[in-house]
Amino acid sequence: DTGVSQDPRHKITKRGQNVTFRCDPISEHNRLYWYRQTLGQGPEFLTYFQNEAQLEKSRLLSDRFSAERPKGSFSTLEIQRTEQGDSAMYLCASSPGTSGGLSYNEQFFGPGTRLTVL
Amino acid sequence: AQTVTQSQPEMSVQEAETVTLSCTYDTSESDYYLFWYKQPPSRQMILVIRQEAYKQQNATENRFSVNFQKAAKSFSLKISDSQLGDAAMYFCAYPKRGSQGNLIFGKGTKLSVKP
């Protein structure tokens, strides 16, 4: 399977604990995105990598959140001191670079990691 | 702020019938892309169809087509000959202005297909 994969698929943790999620993008894609999706809402952008460089972060990404993509391949998203409000589905997506002068950004999504903070 | 509005939280269609999901958006860009994504109950989101705003012709992908009204900033999705496998959440989205393509999504429309 050459799609985007995420691990774990489900995570239950207690408030105050740290959690880390992993995303493996499609191998030839140099762009990687993290989104958060809460119940009844569409995904909301968190952060974006071009290769190993983190180029954009949303205001949703508080200082308890950190993301890395050390070698421009897989990425990790860590949440420190989790809060109940962090409970959500965390989606990873990847895409190839732009095509032509207009940014055409077909993103391929992984299955997500569902986080439940008790 | 750039926004995407999907005014139909839920829709229902009979199998083999046609259904239209609505979407309006707000952007000051003249050239951009618009997308419809499908999220089945298994939760993995897949791209259904895309529209390039500078193209006047509406995009079509098999049973899926769009009605793109640029002046009205409207981008509806028509599903013809609905099938049970079409049951899912459908999200309208477009890239945020000035971003590297990070997408702004609507809240989604839950489509049910009745046999």
Image (cartoon, rainbow, N blue to C red):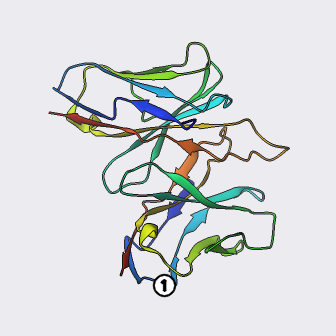
Q: Which residue is mark 1?
A: B16
Describe residue B17's horizontal placement relative to residue A63 as left or right: right
Q: Quadrant of the C terminus of chain B?
A: bottom left
- Of residue B99 and residue A98, the one placed in the foreground of this image is A98
Describe residue A88's horizontal placement relative to residue B27 as left or right: left
- Of residue B60 and residue A100, the one placed in the foreground of this image is B60
Residue A97, horizontal then vertical, whole percent: 73, 35
Vertical arrangement, residue B61 with respect to residue B33, above or below: below
The chain identifier of the residue carrying mark 1 reads B
From where the camera sits, is residue B113 visible? yes
State the image quarter where residue B53 is shown.
bottom right
Vertical arrangement, residue A72 with respect to residue B102, above or below: above
Q: What amino acid is at disc 1?
A: Ala
Farthest-out residue, top: A70
User: Which residue sits at x=62%, y=47%?
Assistant: B96
Vertical arrangement, residue B90 with respect to residue A107, above or below: below
User: Which residue sits at x=49%, y=86%?
Assistant: B17
